[in-house]
Amino acid sequence: MAPKKSSVPVPENWEDDDAPEEDETADLEAFQRQYEDDQSWTALQEDEYGRLRPLDFREEQRAKRQRLLSAAASASIRRGMIRYLQIIVDLSRASSIGDMRPNRLAVMAGVLQGFIRKFFDENPLSHLGLVIMRNGVAERLTELAGSPEAHIAKLQGAMDAGGDASLQNAMNVALDSLKSIPPYGHREVLILFAALSTCDPGNVMDAVKAAKERNVRVSIVGVAAEVHICRVFTKETRGEYGIALNERHFEELVFSHATPPPSLAGDTSASLVRMGFAHRNPDGIDGTAYIGAECKLGTGGFTCPRCRARVVELPCSCHICGLTLVSSPHLARSYHHLFPVRAFSEVPQAELEAVKAGAEATVVAKTSSEDGGSTCYGCLTELTVSGEDLTQDLGVVVRCGECKQLFCYDCDLYIHETLHNCPGCETMASHDQAANSEGQNGAETANMDED
Amino acid sequence: MAQDSDKEDRSLLVILLEAHQGLWSQLNPETDANGTEEPRHLTLAGFLQQVLVFINTFLSLSDANQVAVIGMTSTTSSVLYTSPSLLSSSPVANPVEVSSNPSHEVLANLTILLREEERQTGDAAQPAALSGGLSRGLCLINKAVSSARAGGKRSALPRVLCLQGSPDATQQYIAVMNSIFAAQRSEVVIDACMLSGSESTFLQQATHLTGGIYLRPKLRGALLQYLLTIYCGFTFSRSHLELPQPLGVDFRASCFCHRRAIDMGFVCSVCLSIFCENVPECSICGTCFSNAPRTPAAKRKVGSAFTD
């Protein structure tokens, strides 16, 4: 089914004598021929800080923007906001190979830690669990739970590799723990796969069938090469399959799973979930109580509004009455997935020159000119460059379609990746809303904005 | 200049001034019981005087400190002043510019801003666009921090101080929360000083989540005292100071249907909107809910004793 592993160095002395050496020199010659005409250094330049960067970095920026734009364009679709994600980590012998520096295992561990933090940052109401594949068996490292630090601590303690990977065993464990989640939750499995084979007790297609039946979305990020059974898994369960080219690409691929995936209306039954907004208890002597399921005497914590039990942190489910306890910022953290900033459009260089000329002609003080002249509205950087000084060039300039303000490339990234607000639109927003009581996002937002 | 200052504590302070005209008439009602309650009063002129003294004091604490002042009105926001070293992307700052006077620049630009506001709108009672000001401030900070990092230098410690007077604009809720989370992610501390009589939930949440200080001064006329004693010092030295303790922050949500603050509610699993009662259809995203809400407690029928 899956190709037998070939890239794995086999320690046994099955190859011998001088034959490989000749191969090696032939390889080297081929390598030299291939890169003979590649003068990559001519496409580089030095910037003001001595860093090297490509001459046509605009293209690079455009490519990155393109990825952002596609994310923004797909933002109006329905997403699974309450997720239950099982991460399966491949700790088989293949993950100790050193084609990524220092080895695949260290890279996977580092990226996974970052991912766990980012996952809870973007999906505070979601749950996550860890399963590892090692020595042909699957082991449940952590149960589905909400706290990132607990997962990371467990993960750090389990980082040694050996044996084979078994997709079927791992899927059985993962599906088992996803069985008991509430019907509105989105079931997902993310596999970090290093091996090129799977060593299973039965037919691995049974696992595919079971995942499909239970509506579990299986996504896989491979660090070696594409494997047929992984492709089948992701295709059948409408997941995503990516193969990492290098360490950075691997991180990109894994982190792309932090955003809630699109969901079909029939995937999960939508329902109203009863949640409690817990009160924070005062610190100090007045707030002293037995807190949490462990009944530790302490101060602070939160009080469940239904049964008055004290819990240590939010979000969690009350250990007495089972009510989901959250605070309003936890909900607000997810709203940017639902109301994203519209994608900005690129302004051609010629138009930019015209804007600058116009701003200079009408000598208005810089603050009063409505479209901010030729400076970035966010960071006030000069957007047009005088002369041919390429090292000062800022690259792509963009404009917001709503408020017509200009932004530099850095601010564009910051606004779409971190801030999720257009500063120009926000400034105009209160005026607009005063005029016709309708926000930037239409009537829906006007209702939503309450707190 | 920049090389020497790498060793010492440097702050980058972005001050958000709410400066629209309607605010000052709200803050100082004409009818006054005693007539001579001078320290509680704060006029625009007095406010600006005190803020300018604060800015100059802050700048004189260290020549590496940087300040940006953003003015917010109900219709626009504009950057009133930025330290020259903040804007020049090249590491060599022009020595002539360094000696520029922030007071003049702030006042001149503020006058322009207020004139423009007057021209644009007749109704000056609208609250200022806090979200817009915060977003612009965070963009400025992001640029300053990232360019310092690219140059291999340690960047100044970024901080935002909101001087707000008007009550929260509820339609800005999502935008303000987005800004707060962005600040939290980029480790920007948001401090707030609320000038009006009522507390601001937005600013309370902002300061709580980013580790800043929230204060509603009792004597608004003595604003400078508060600013100097509380907001002037370096962020790291705060642990050594006796600062106002945060009061409880209200993290309760209000439902989207009646705008009541609730302890317990129902959340739509698709769009996370909050309702205070069991509704058959989500009014925000239009989803029909197939079944009654199920919680583990409801299933077990144990929780029924606790429900109200």
Image (tube, coloured by chain):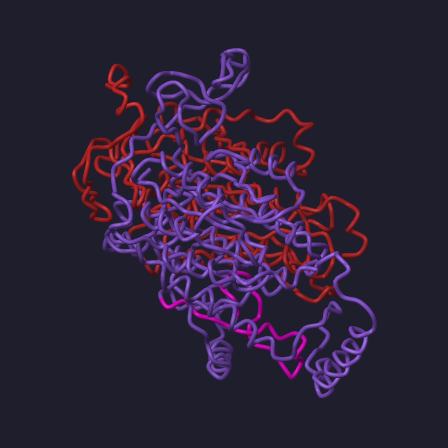
At a point 41% along the width and 48% down the height, the residue shown is A207
At a point 52% along the width and 54% down the height, the residue shown is A255
Residue B93 percent across, percent down from the top left: 73, 64
Above or below, B187 against B211 in this view is below
Q: Which residues are magenta?
A: A375-401
Chain B: give its colour: red
**Chain assigned purple:** A
Report the side of B268 relative to B279 (left or right). right
For the question of whether residue B186 can be seen, the reply is no
For the question of whether residue B98 can be seen, the reply is yes
- Outermost residue on the bottom side: it is A37
Q: Quadrant of residue A325?
A: top left
Above or below, A359 against A197 in this view is below
Residue A234 percent across, percent down from the top left: 42, 57
Q: Give the quadrant of the C terminus of chain B.
A: top left
Report the side of A268 relative to A148 (left or right). left
Residue A393 included in the magenta stretch of the image: yes
Most frequent secondary structure within the magenta stretch: loop
Viewer-side residue, B285 vs A234: A234
